[in-house]
Every structure is written in structure tokens, then in C-alpha cells.
Image: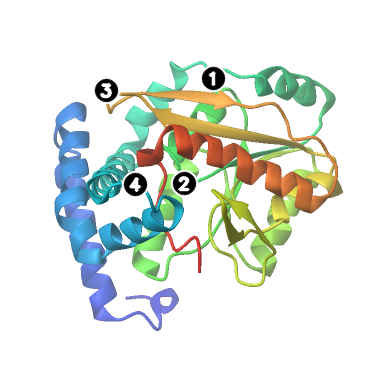
Amino acid sequence: MTERHKGQGWGDWMSDRVFRGMIWLALRLPRGPRIRLMGWIAERIVAPMAGYLDRARENLALIHPQMPEAERDRIARRVANNMGRLLIENYATDELMAQARAHQPTGRGMEALRQARDQGRPAIFVTGHFGNFGFGRAVLAAQGIEIAGLYRPMRNVFFNEHYTRMMEAVGGHSFPQGRKGTAGFARHLRDGGQAVLLVDQHIAGAPQLDFLGQPARTALSAAELALKYDALLIPFYATRLPDGLNFTVDLEAPIPHTDPVTMTQALNDSLAERVRAHPDQWFWIHRRWK
């Protein structure tokens, strides 16, 4: 361990070594079998042990109390399967970027984005933990868009090191949350850059806005930054196709500039529509409603 690992226990180090070994072994397999295997491991081993399935079932019961228990269980397991798939997809960065370069994003946001780039105007792409959000970012990067990201560092420092490298390999520079990271992220926007934010996690002290029919604390930061730097605010999603291996990437029309609460509610509504259409592709395992 080095000085930057101070405060981390040997358990964290060992967990990271096991994870690294699993990723290394999985990457030795052909793409299709590798992705399906990691989905199975996440669904059948990791999610039950970590309590993710129970949490997903609880969240589904909150939002869909009339849904049969068997259907909630099916969705929870598919969510875990998608989690395993996207993890190994994103760690196979060369393959992911090759797939991204061959993909053409669609949606009304594409034309607005082209105009903004011609004008040197910044853009903020907003998504959630849906489908494979890393692939969506990779597709934008493959279009020549250097995207900065703002992320919440992992508690396990060993894991966070290679996770951050992976994120930057499929997008652009990633800034850790905090005063210094947020300042760098803001400078990137101020200089006319593009950025990506995920807005579907509970943020203590944030306003309670509607998400899937229930109040959920939601950060206003994406809308506030868009207003401050006159940036486009574009919802975008990478939706997994039925074959389990490929995606569509869609950029929606930019959110009109009004006020932070109205704009953020529009982002919540946009994501909610995607979740209703594909409930097994959103991370119900998060503690979204506390």
C-alpha cells in the first residue's frame, strides 16, 4: 500500500484483488460468452450476497405496489444481470470504443448539438444509471466530443483507481466530487466544453422532486450549471437491445432554459419515461427514495 491508500484496510485490498482477478479472467473469453457470464454472476451470486435483489424488490414495491411479486423478482434479477454486463463491457475498453465508433446516435438533440459545437457553446449531457450509460458516453466521445464527467469516488480507494481510469478511457477527463473537482468541471464548461452528469441518485439536502410518482431528493446542479454557462441540457440514453449485446443511443431535444427546479423535473420526467418503457434496465438497486 502507498500513502494515498492510507486508511484503507486489507479487506478492501483483498476485495479489489479478487475483483481484478475476475475481470482479468473474464476478458480472456470471447465477447458474447464473457458478457453473458458476467451477467449471470451478478444476477446469481453478487446481487443476492450484497442485498441488491432485496433493495430492488423494495423499490419496485414502492413504485409498483400492484405488480405481482414474481414480476418484481424477475425485473430485479434482470437489473442485476444488466449490472454485470455493463461492468465487463466497460472494462473491455478497446472493444467498447470500436463498437462506439461504428454506432450512429439518433434523436432531436443531435442537430442542436451540431449547432452548439459550431458556435462554441457548451453542452451538458444528462442521463441516469440506465442501460449502459458508459456506452452512451463512449459513443459521444467517438463523435469527437471530449466529455468531462463529475463522479462520486468509491469508498474502496484501490477499486476507485482503476474504475476512474476505465471511465476516462471511454470518455474524457473525470473530476471527483468535491470543491477542487467541481471547480475543474465548471472551468471545462466555461471554456465551451461538453460534460456528462448522472442525476438519479439520492443527494442529502437536495429538493424533493417527483420521480416515478414518489418524492426523491434530486440535485439541481445540472440545470444550475446549464443556466450559469448558457449550456445546452440534453438528456441521452443508451438502451440495451433484446440481443443483450448491442444498444441504441438517443439524444433527446434540449431541455428549455427556465429555472433549476422546472428543468430538473423535466430531466426526472425524461428518465422516468425510459424506466417505464424498460424497467429492467434502470438501477433499482440504488437507495433512490430514502
Marks 2 and 1, how far apart in space?
18 Å
Residue in the image at 46% along x and 20% along y: 101
Q: Amino acid at mark 3?
A: Asp
105 over 211 or under it: above or below: above
Mark 4 highlights which residue? 67
Q: Nearer the viewer, mark 2 or mark 4?
A: 4
Can residue 143 be seen?
Answer: yes
Q: CA distance from mark 4 to mark 1?
A: 34 Å
Label whose residue precedes the other's in the sequence (1 or 3): 1
* Mark found first going from the N terminus, 4 or 3: 4
- Against 8, residue 287 (above or below) is above
Q: Residue at x 63, y 68 (%)?
A: 178
Q: Which residue is mark 2?
A: 129
Left or right placement of residue 119 versus residue 43 in this view: right
Label 1 element class: loop
The kind of secondary structure element at disc 4 is loop
